[in-house]
Amino acid sequence: MKFYKSVRPAAAAVALIAPGIPKNLDVSSSPSIQSIAKTIAAGAMAYYPGDATHFVDLPDPYYWWETGALFGAMVDYSHYTGDHSYDPTIATAILAQAGPSFDYMLPKHYGDEGNDDQAFWGFAVMAAAESNFPQPNTTMPSWLDMSENIWNSLASRWDMSACNGGMLWQIFASNPNGLTYKNSVSNGGFFQLSARLARATGNSTYADWATKVWDWSKGVGLLDGDYNVYDGTNINDNCTTINHQTFSYSQGIYLYGAAVMANSSRTADDQLSWTKHTEGLLKASGSFFTPYPNATDIMYEHACELGGTCNTDMRSFKGYLSRFMSRSARLVPSIAQDVNTILSMSARGAGFACTGGASGTTCGQKWYMGGFDGTVGLGEEMCALETIHGLLAKDATPPFKGDDIQTIRSFSS
């Protein structure tokens, strides 16, 4: 592993870009996208009570996992836009949650942390490794080392007691219902992290595990023949009954894992197979678009959004689909045009939805309404941010791998 000071690009150009008005978004203009993303990033970070020197949990009603999701989004924001003004706060937050074994098993959350929660922090840490995000604390491991620690922790809980394998939703006995449920987000999170570590390190053990989790997911029925990703299954009947509810983030998690496998496959046959899986997952994600005939290719959470029943967690889900769609398109050229087209439409819709509040830039939930719908929260800000700044992913440096992943110890040279 290499040790460097900072190799971060200068942020001066972005600093000169004024925050933009979201409804004026021009999806064909990088400066426009940067300026709108800057506005919405500020809106999202306004929910975070910590700063560059102190980590503070998000207030109720936001759970710990969504803090990890927020900083995963902000790592991408820094990488895609070149605006590094939040970098010290991002690094402080992510490092503060590493735990005594540097695997994001945090004593404060013993009893409520699930496998899916740990996976979401893993996404943030892995993104930091893949983008050579600054890691200034010399007393702690590198981002990549901590990503491997997270993976080892998850792998240790692969459960062979029922259903021929799989990851349970929960870890601790204080969450008994989740100790009988094998859900797609936990298993998909483990699949994706396995794929990303395989690409980053070249270690075939990770690739073997990614294939193992994929095959298990298909075999048990969490993935159907049309690449729909279902919510989960219960060990009480040996996983013979599937909960067919679908959520956008589950689809996105498996999508990006497959895309990473396609990008890093060592044989032509494997690349062809994983590319087919990626294309199938993208096609199946079409169910999360176009809720009304007059709203072409606008993303929505079909399980709850139209009826107004989304809980706090669900209100952030489609942002993760956007995150992983834009990342997938960067690695698999065959889906790039389709992803750019549909995310551009959703980004425009999000821009018009971010017209609320005293500032006129607060984001709403329903992007197909042509304006602000009055539903506000961190989830709404994150969804808009990830969809809009994701339009810059196609021109950003792709995720680093191998010796190009550097251990960076400072924010400036």
Image (cartoon, rainbow, N blue to C red):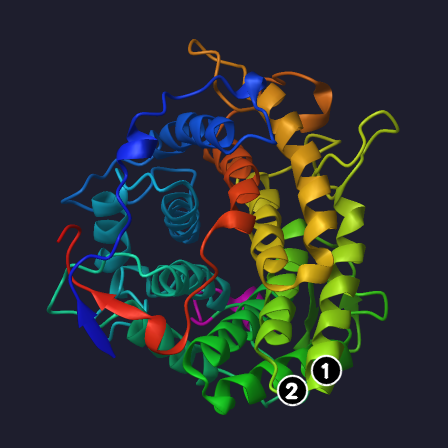
> Is 297 situated above or below 194?
above
Counting from the top left corner in percent of width and height, residue 335 is at: 72, 57
Above or below, 327 relative to 20: below
Please identify the residue farthest to the top as the structure is shown.
358
**Residue 335: within the magenta?**
no
Residue that carries the numbered disc 1 in the rendered image: 238
Q: Tell me the residue at 38%/38% (across/down).
A: 60
Q: In which quarter of the image is residue 153?
A: bottom left
Asked if the residue under mark 1 is in contact with the one under mark 2, i.e. CB atoms within 8 Å, the reply is yes
In the rendered view, does 161 fall on the left or right side of 197? right
Part of the protein shown in magenta: 171-180
Residue at 23% in and 44% down: 89
Q: Quadrant of residue 84?
A: top left
Q: Look at 60% across and 31% down and name the residue there.
A: 27
Q: Mark 2 points at which residue?
A: 162
Q: Where residue 388 appears, x then y in whole percent? A: 55, 36
Q: Give me the residue at 15% from left, 56% from top.
A: 410
* Magenta-colored stretch includes residue 176: yes
From this view, report whether residue 92 is shown above or below residue 299.
below
Location of residue 294 in the rendering, given as x and y in whole percent from the top left corner: 85, 24
Q: Magenta stretch: dominant SS?
A: loop
Real-space Cα distance between discs 2 and 1? 6 Å
